[in-house]
Image (tube, grey):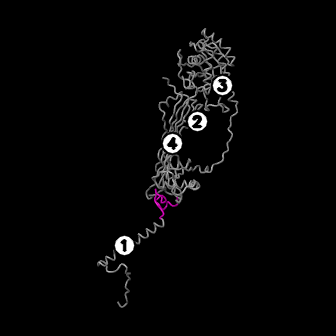
């Protein structure tokens, strides 16, 4: 079984940020020395880095789930939590990173090239970092946010200048072995080559790499054979060489029909935008420079077939070379022709002016300053207002909803951002449901009359907020009922005392106003 994997789906997640610490400095003769809770550490990132020692994506095929280190929690005495360990994943040069829907995220070409696949979460602030003139001793800290979690697709596209294409057993691997120091597996049965082979060829002053695409047959672009797995390795090549078998034993095959089949498959293959030239455009495979190598001319039947089809190929506009991997006939001329195409392609890349995208001027949205948007929805025939934006969502993740003071701090942040004003403009009314974030999110019953400001916290102990306490303003009817209940309670108490007086327990009426007797001088 081949140990070569050139496409994997990788599940990556950054480390979660550590929670901030709630602590108060306590020393001798100084029981309340102020907040000293440290910040939580940031979570580690997942980074893809090109490594020359890595040639396949096999490791990620067997272990597709990768997670970076979590950040440590903050501690007292202003001690911050440790930063999560960054996870570096080595990938081969030429790896293209895509999203699940096929969008190209990064094209990793060049040793040391990096791409942050999943960023780590942010560490939460401790109560020492949250203290201010109005909030001198916060009784809460911010929670760490979770790291990014996503599924990405890694596709390996070989870095080669020339691609050899052709039917199985056409002699592509033999040509690479004869022209370079590569030693691929060679046999006389179809689909011997199961992985793309690379070889370095020196022709004069030009050094270039040659790759073969295994298993191209009719219908390869539709999933037949093996070619549909490896056509992506041709996308970076400057030119293609058709290797035609002139000594094929099959009666229904000949070099011209083989060429037509391969050209049709190349035309059907759609090259994506993961590799583009200096001008930002991608040249289709069937429009790139192409050479034809009539292989196996060392066999008598092969030479006769090459002489028969060569005029037709030259009539079509191809440069034709009669070669033999066994006797090395014609390989020098073919190598120099390849080198000329590669040199011209490299020169075009160096001299082409860089493509600069024209700036696009877009009007700023109404809520661009605040960094959030409000969307009106309906749930169970009731209005629902959804607040979307990086800051509100992150602030909700940082809030400890078991701490009233932390909830009040969140309310102050949202009010300062302008969420309450925008809810008014969107038509929200007191008691309407407000959701922050996508999906279920965090649901609030909106109360716009809540008093804001940290200056009110002095009236409540640490960890609490008087604004969060359950309070409802009584209606006029409720006030009348409460007043009547108090009157009835007082009347019942007087009646009970009067009954006790008549029974002899008391000597005076409850309605008698006791006045202290005046003492005369005569007494």
Q: Specify whether 420 is left or right of 352.
A: left
The residue under label 1 is 492
In whole angstroms, how far apart are the C-alphas of marks 4 and 3? 44 Å
Mark number for residue 288? 3
**Few, some or many C-alpha atoms within 10 Å of disc 2 (few <14, some 14-19, many ≥20)?**
some
- N-terminal-most mark, 1 or 3: 3
In whole angstroms, how far apart are the C-alphas of marks 4 and 1? 66 Å
Closer to viewer: mark 4 or mark 3: 3
State the residue in front, 142 or 488: 488
User: Residue 472: horizontal and vertical position, in percent?
Assistant: 47, 62
State the residue in front, 123 or 96: 96
Closer to viewer: mark 4 or mark 1: 1
Closer to viewer: mark 2 or mark 4: 2
**Few, some or many C-alpha atoms within 10 Å of disc 4 (few <14, some 14-19, many ≥20)?**
many
The residue under label 4 is 147
Closer to viewer: mark 1 or mark 3: 1
Magenta stretch: residue 219 in it?
Answer: no
The residue under label 2 is 103
In whole angstroms, how far apart are the C-alphas of marks 1 and 2? 80 Å
Q: Specify whether 185 is left or right of 283.
A: left
Q: Secondary structure at mark 3?
A: loop
**Few, some or many C-alpha atoms within 10 Å of disc 1 (few <14, some 14-19, many ≥20)?**
few
Labels 4 and 1 touching (C-beta < 8 A)? no
* Residue range corresponding to the magenta coloring: 454-474
Q: Specify whether 338 is left or right of 387.
A: right
- N-terminal-most mark, 3 or 2: 2
User: Residue 416: horizontal and vertical position, in percent?
Assistant: 57, 55
In whole angstroms, how far apart are the C-alphas of marks 3 and 2? 24 Å
Q: Secondary structure at mark 4?
A: loop
Residue 265 position by quadrant: top right
């Amino acid at each position: 079984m081949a140990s070569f994997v050139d496409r994997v789906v990788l599940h990556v997640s950054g480390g979660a940020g550590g929670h901030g610490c709630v602590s108060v400095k306590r020393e001798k003769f100084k029981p309340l020395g102020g907040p000293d809770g440290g910040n939580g550490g940031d979570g580690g990132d997942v980074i893809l880095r090109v490594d020359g020692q890595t040639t396949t994506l096999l490791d990620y095929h067997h272990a597709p789930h990768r997670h970076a280190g979590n950040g440590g929690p903050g501690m007292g005495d202003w001690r911050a939590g440790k930063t999560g360990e960054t996870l570096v994943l080595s990938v081969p040069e030429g790896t293209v990173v895509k999203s699940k829907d096929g969008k190209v995220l990064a094209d990793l070409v060049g040793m040391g090239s990096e791409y942050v696949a999943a960023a780590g979460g942010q560490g939460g602030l401790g109560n020492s970092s949250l203290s201010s003139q109005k909030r001198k001793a916060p009784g809460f800290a911010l929670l760490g946010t979770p790291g990014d979690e996503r599924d990405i697709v890694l596709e390996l596209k070989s870095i080669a200048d020339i691609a050899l294409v052709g039917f199985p057993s056409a002699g592509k691997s033999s040509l690479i072995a004869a022209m370079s120091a590569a030693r691929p597996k060679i046999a006389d049965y179809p689909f011997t080559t199961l992985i793309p082979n690379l070889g370095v060829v020196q022709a004069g002053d030009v050094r270039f790499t040659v790759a073969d695409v295994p298993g191209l047959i009719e219908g390869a672009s539709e999933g037949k054979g093996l070619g549909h797995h490896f056509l992506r390795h041709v996308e970076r090549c400057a030119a293609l060489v058709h290797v035609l078998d002139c000594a094929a034993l099959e009666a229904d095959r000949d070099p011209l029909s083989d060429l037509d089949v391969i050209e049709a498959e190349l035309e059907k293959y759609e090259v994506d935008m993961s590799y583009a030239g200096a001008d930002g455009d991608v040249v289709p495979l069937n429009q790139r420079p192409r050479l034809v190598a009539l292989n196996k001319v060392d066999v008598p039947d092969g030479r006769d077939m090459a002489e028969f089809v060569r005029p037709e190929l030259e009539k079509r506009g191809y440069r034709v070379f009669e070669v033999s991997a066994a006797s090395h006939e014609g390989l020098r001329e073919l190598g120099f022709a390849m080198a000329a195409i590669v040199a011209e392609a490299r020169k075009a890349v160096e001299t082409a002016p860089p493509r600069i995208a024209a700036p696009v001027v877009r009007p700023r949205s109404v809520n661009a300053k605040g960094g959030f948007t409000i969307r009106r929805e309906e749930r169970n025939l009731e209005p629902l207002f959804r607040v979307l934006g990086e800051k509100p969502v992150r602030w909700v993740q940082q809030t400890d909803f078991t701490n009233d003071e932390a909830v009040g701090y969140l309310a102050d942040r949202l009010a300062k951002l302008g969420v309450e004003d925008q809810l008014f403009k969107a038509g929200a009314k007191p008691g309407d449901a407000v959701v922050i974030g996508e999906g279920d999110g965090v649901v609030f019953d909106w109360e716009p009359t809540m008093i804001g400001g940290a200056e009110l916290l002095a009236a409540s102990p640490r960890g609490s907020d008087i604004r969060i306490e359950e309070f409802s303003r009584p209606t006029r009817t409720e006030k009348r009922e409460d007043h009547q209940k108090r009157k009835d309670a007082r009347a019942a108490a007087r009646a009970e005392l009067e009954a006790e007086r008549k029974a002899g327990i008391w000597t005076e009426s409850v309605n008698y106003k006791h006045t202290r007797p005046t003492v005369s001088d005569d007494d």
